[in-house]
Image: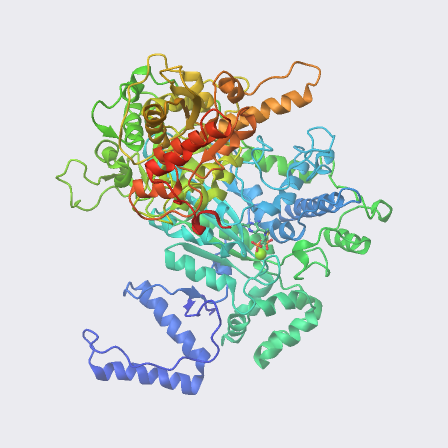
Amino acid sequence: MKLVVGQHQPAPLLRRGGNRPRRPASGVHGLGPFRTQEWLESLDQVVDHAGRNRARYLMLSILQRARDRRVGVSNLRSTDYLNTIAPETEPDFPGDEHVERRIRAYNRWNAAVMVHRAQRPGIAVGGHISTYASAAALYEVGFNHFFRGHDAPGGGDQIYFQGHASPGIYARAFLEGRLSSDQLDGFRQELSHAGAGGGLPSYPHPRLMPDFWEFPTVSMGLGPINAIYQARFNRYLHDRGLKDTSGQRVWAFLGDGEMDEPESLGAIGVAAREELDNLTFVVNCNLQRLDGPVRGNGKIIQELESYFRGAGWNVIKVIWGREWDPLLAADTDGALVNLMNTTPDGDFQTYKAESGAFVREHFFGRDPRTAAMVEHLSDTEIWNLKRGGHDYRKLYAAYRAATEHTGQPTVILAKTIKGWTLGSHFEGRNSTHQMKKLTLEDLKGFRDRLFLEIPDKDLDAVKPPYYRPPKDSPELAYLRERRRALGGYLPARRRGSTRLAPIGESAYAVTRRGSGRQAVATTMAFVRLLKELMKDPQTGPRFVPIIPDEARTFGLDALFPSKKIYSPHGQTYQSVDRDQLLSYQEDTQGVLLHEGITEAGSAASWTAAGTSYATHGEPMIPLYIFYSMFGFQRTGDQFWAAADQMSRGFLLGATAGRTTLNGEGLQHQDGHSLLLASANPACIAYDAAFAFELGHITADALRRMYGEPRPDEDQNVFYYLTLYNEPIVQPAEPDDVDIDGIIAGMHRYSPATDATGPRAQILASGVAMQWALDAQRLLRADWGVQADVWSVTSWTQLRREALAVEEWNLSHPDQPGRTPYVTRRLSGAPGPVVAVSDWMRAVPDQIMPFVAGPWASLGTDGFGRSDTRDALRRHFGVDAQSITLRVLQQLAAGGELDTSMPRRAMATYDLSNGTEDQTRSGQ
Ligand SMILES: Cc1ncc(C[n+]2csc(CCOP(=O)(O)OP(=O)(O)O)c2C)c(N)n1
Ligand SMILES: [Mg+2]
């Protein structure tokens, strides 16, 4: 009988030698101390007379039986280094193994040749050969038997392809006739390759290939976490009755090195907790990452098994190919299993870079019993004992088991060889990840290994040919038939066209009427608006608020009673605050996604919801609200990937500003997320000062992303709105409000009331508007200076427009030059410009080159501190008095005021030496 029950294998390092026996726990119910002693003595006897292996086998068998009898012993963290599925329980393989092997061979060849050709002299743009070579069977078993295309009943599967395995995915699309050889030759030459359709992006980039790639994965760790939240979002759509997603499965193909990333493992508990049996991870355990072994001294498969089992996943290990089955069947005393268990990955890697004789000596030769087991095998036969991840039948059994398993997500841990079939220069070599070219000899060996009919004379060292059999060949017919049966070719992205009906004007009234005498922060104003928007009968249900445990901080608990928090389990307990108005309510049809304290999880959720318009053809409007400091700074890479995936929706940076979240200090106070946001080309950022501005911005954002974009507008954008927590009296919207200005990025909110005396322009955004208005009063009352105050709703949008105008002017030298919006708006506004915000100066300085007159900016550069708002504003030199002083200095420098005035102002406002602080500038 073969041992397939679990063993207690410590991870990650193998512990050699046994642990000291411990005394048993006393007082086991119903068994006196004597009987316990008898059991222990029996075990001692087995150890003494039959050996440790036998004793181990016995113990594991007893544990297995105990589990079968539901005795209540806990699950073992890991099992033997064996396939989880025993050969006798493997299902029949339904495909044509020969034909599928041919298809795999063509893909292997074309993928490697594509990268090789991209490395040709004069181009040399690189690529990865060895990763797909190790993963070809992992993908092909999916393509031929499991992955459902978009046309499959119930909708297609969502597949996260390992980013740098892209050459193999392109190679398959070439066989399918979806890509031409000319396009393959444009791999990584998206700009310079002139062929039809241009070049191909390096990695899965939906933005660059919007009808092909669906999920950007190449930033390691984002694929796994996004896949988990995608599967979770599919459930959410289903449970809310918005779409039947019960037939859809999420597959994520990951590298074993990639599992080092915190994001890779950080959310696996979510998948188990929510019982996401619509999710399958396939981890390609080729034991190598970029530089060398993943766990040379340990065993990555065992380590991952422990993590996933511990988190509550179904784990299927595919370690050995079928050639090992007879050997394992003959391993009655567990000698071979013991070798397998105790050989570190570093050695397994080395074996496959050596030879059959080496494996005989260094692996089997370590125990006379295992050495005897392979005596009848030649070195070649030993060499041909394959790894499970290259065995189609083993993989088929694993995928089938994964798709049939219920109640848990499944991870398949498949052992492979990096660079497999590429020959001895590639296979298992530490340098294999970086190798982009094959020698002529390598090419010949590779061709022979794959049994391809390419004559020697065609094997050009620089441009070896692609290989595609005739259209009517059995292989291509088979491939086409399989994809037809499974619902069409993949990857394929559908763009989604459903438009959402605009929400009526009345919903926005709440932002326009002002707050009377009540002081209301813009965060609260936005939440009030959101409540109104969510009431819209058609579009309202599409809003998906996402919160990482800050609902109460931002006032979103107001939505608890009416919208409820989504949980697939509903609420199985009595809530402690059930009698209260804003009680914590979980519900299977809840609308709010309360993610717990995980910005990474929230960002992944937001991406899944924000791309639903394409992935599911169901536009959803996610609003992810977070501490602005923990957004772009913490999960900026996820927002970048979301931009690639053309996500739409709202990011709400609450508690914005360096001085406004006053008590929290250095780690919380954000004076730079707007700068980080400006670096994301798909992100449209606004720093609104007033509720009425937020109303117009939101309406315009919804129009652009979900309604009728103008011809010059990219619809695939998302909005970053900063929201403050400082209560202010919200003014009613001015009658002559400049809506276009609000959207474009600036409007004159408070013109100077008097035309006499020196003039200046104050540009302010967000909460700094209050200080600017105070400065306007001080300037007039104390110094006779008249200032116009502008509300700059978006420094970044003003800059972007100006850059676009500059570019247009450069490329149209023969036509009259155009003038940037910001320049136009300020052209008739007399006096120097002083810009101020609760952000570092680089934020307003974005528009400096486009302002004609003298320019000065005030900002909050440096680390935040905990103190009162007033103290902080004085510290950073952004309060009303500091603004006043700066305006006076500017006017004096321009000769419009006496030079003594700024000095007098410093004394009047006690402003001397307030800002010389090393923590501010990093000088
Ligand atoms: C966040 C991030 N860091 C680093 C890289 C660079 N990188 C690309 S592939 C790779 C090694 C991947 O190893 P593994 O996940 O085991 O994949 P394999 O090629 O072995 O299948 C690295 C470090 C990246 N793509 N993303
Ligand atoms: Mg690897």
Vertical arrangement, residue 547 with respect to residue 198, above or below: below
The foreground one among 91 and 267 is 267
Identify which residue, 346 or 216, lies in the foreground.
216
Name the residue nearer the viewer: 897 or 675.
897
The colour scheme of the drawn protein is: rainbow
How many circles with numbers are drawn on the protein? 0
Quadrant of the rendered image containing residue 49: bottom left
- Percent across and percent down for residue 497 are 48, 22
**Residue 836 appears in the figure:** no
Residue occupying the far top of the picture:
736
Name the foreground residue: 747 vs 513. 747
Question: Measured from the top left, where is residue 839 in percent x and y?
Answer: 42, 38
From this viewpoint, which residue is outermost toward the left? Answer: 579
In this view, the residue farthest toward the right is 457
With respect to residue 792, does 501 lie above or below? above
* Point 33% across, 12% down: residue: 735
